[in-house]
Image: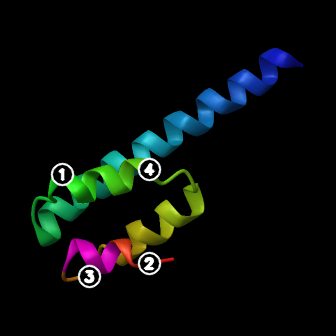
Amino acid sequence: MHETVAWDYYLEEGARRYAVQTLLRQGKARIGTPDEETVAALNKIRDLDRLGRLSDMIHTATSWQEVLATP
């Protein structure tokens, strides 16, 4: 059982990192390169559902602040 918990953690962490990388890549193309504070804020987000909402927002946002304001 202990191995399953660790495995689930690593899968979720990998998904989270991929979501942040994808968000940064899409955001750079759409609204420009984020500053260090924005990158740090994105890296602190652990909620995969929120990262998904941020990814949806990137298509209409005009700034990184607008993206980060998404609950």
Who comes first in sequence, dot 2 or dot 3?
A: 3
Three-letter code, disc 1: Glu
**Left or right of residue 61: residue 5:** right
Q: CA distance from mark 1 to mark 2?
A: 19 Å
On whether residue 64 falls in the magenta region, the answer is yes
Task: Residue 44: give x, y in percent of width and height.
Answer: 44, 50
The residue singled out by tag 1 in the image is 36
Helix, strand, or loop for circle 1? Answer: helix
**Pointer 3: residues within 10 angstroms few (<14), some, or many (20+)?**
some
The residue singled out by tag 2 in the image is 70
User: So how many labels did they put on this image?
Assistant: 4
Q: CA distance from mark 3 to mark 1?
A: 19 Å
Helix, strand, or loop for circle 4? Answer: helix
**Pointer 2: residues within 10 angstroms few (<14), some, or many (20+)?**
few
Three-letter code, disc 2: Thr
Q: Nearer the viewer, mark 2 or mark 3?
A: 2
Query: Which span is picked out in magenta?
Result: 63-67
**Residue 26 to residue 2: above or below:** below
**Residue 34 to residue 43: above or below:** below
Who comes first in sequence, dot 1 or dot 2?
A: 1
The residue singled out by tag 4 in the image is 44
Q: CA distance from mark 2 to mark 3?
A: 10 Å
Q: Residue at x 52, y 41 (%)?
A: 15
Task: Residue 67: give x, y in percent of width and height.
Answer: 33, 74
**Pointer 1: residues within 10 angstroms few (<14), some, or many (20+)?**
few
Question: For the view shown, which residue lies furthest in the right direction?
Answer: 1
Three-letter code, disc 3: Ala
Q: CA distance from mark 2 to mark 4?
A: 14 Å
The residue singled out by tag 3 in the image is 61
User: Which one is nearer the viewer's eye here, 56 or 3?
Assistant: 3
Q: Looking at the image, do the residues carrying marks 4 and 3 touch, with CB atoms under 8 Å apart?
A: no
